[in-house]
Image: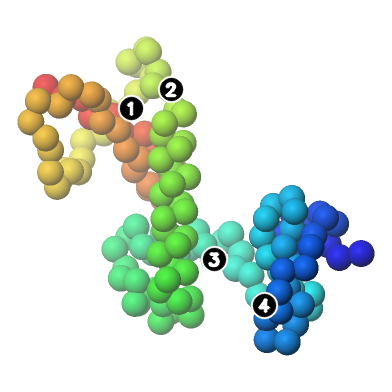
Amino acid sequence: MILCKHCGSDKSRKDGMVQGKQRYRCNECNKTFRIGDNREKYTLAQKIKVIKLYTEGVGLRAIERSEGISTPLLIHWIRYFSKMLREKLCTTEIPQDSRQIEILEVDELFTYYQKKVTVPMCGLLWTETGIKLLISRGK
């Protein structure tokens, strides 16, 4: 029985050959895998470390050199994490009671701010103590 290395399902089908080895496609998660593929996966801690380095202003090439991770993979991780944060922002409810919102003054938060903003803008500030929700209302 062949188990998917991504989801553990036993429902897979043959999906061609790669470097002389049989490739399989999982019918559950639709991902491909090979038997005996011992490539190393990156841990969540490694991914978070890379994202923190990026948000602190370290360049992609510097991260690539220090962590040994390719630039296209770094970009993939950054886009994936930003998509997750965007989804979290869209599902987060803003508290009605203004006493629950901590006041935080940030200089140069936006590089461009539209005139006549009619929709409240929001974003996340990632600090060492956690993630804070920032709300900016148009005047």
Q: Amino acid at mark 3?
A: Gln
Residue occupying image coordinates x 79% and y 75%: 35
In this rendering, the label closer to the viewer, 4 or 2: 4
In this rendering, the label closer to the viewer, 1 or 2: 2
Task: Locate residue 71 relative to residue 1 in the image: left or right.
Answer: left
Of 45 and 2, which appears nearest the observer?
A: 2
In this rendering, the label closer to the viewer, 1 or 3: 3
Please report whichever mark, 1 or 2, sits nearer to the chain's N-terminal start.
2
Circle 2 residue: 93
Circle 4 residue: 39
Residue occupying image coordinates x 37% and y 13%: 96
Query: Do callouts 2 and 3 mark residues in contact (Cβ within 8 Å)?
Result: no
Please report whichever mark, 1 or 4, sits nearer to the chain's N-terminal start.
4
Q: Amino acid at mark 4?
A: Arg
Circle 3 residue: 46
Of 11 and 99, which appears nearest the observer?
A: 11
Alpha carbons under labels 1 and 3: distance apart: 31 Å
Snapshot quadrant of residue 101: top left
Residue occupying image coordinates x 60% and y 68%: 42
| Label 3 element class | helix
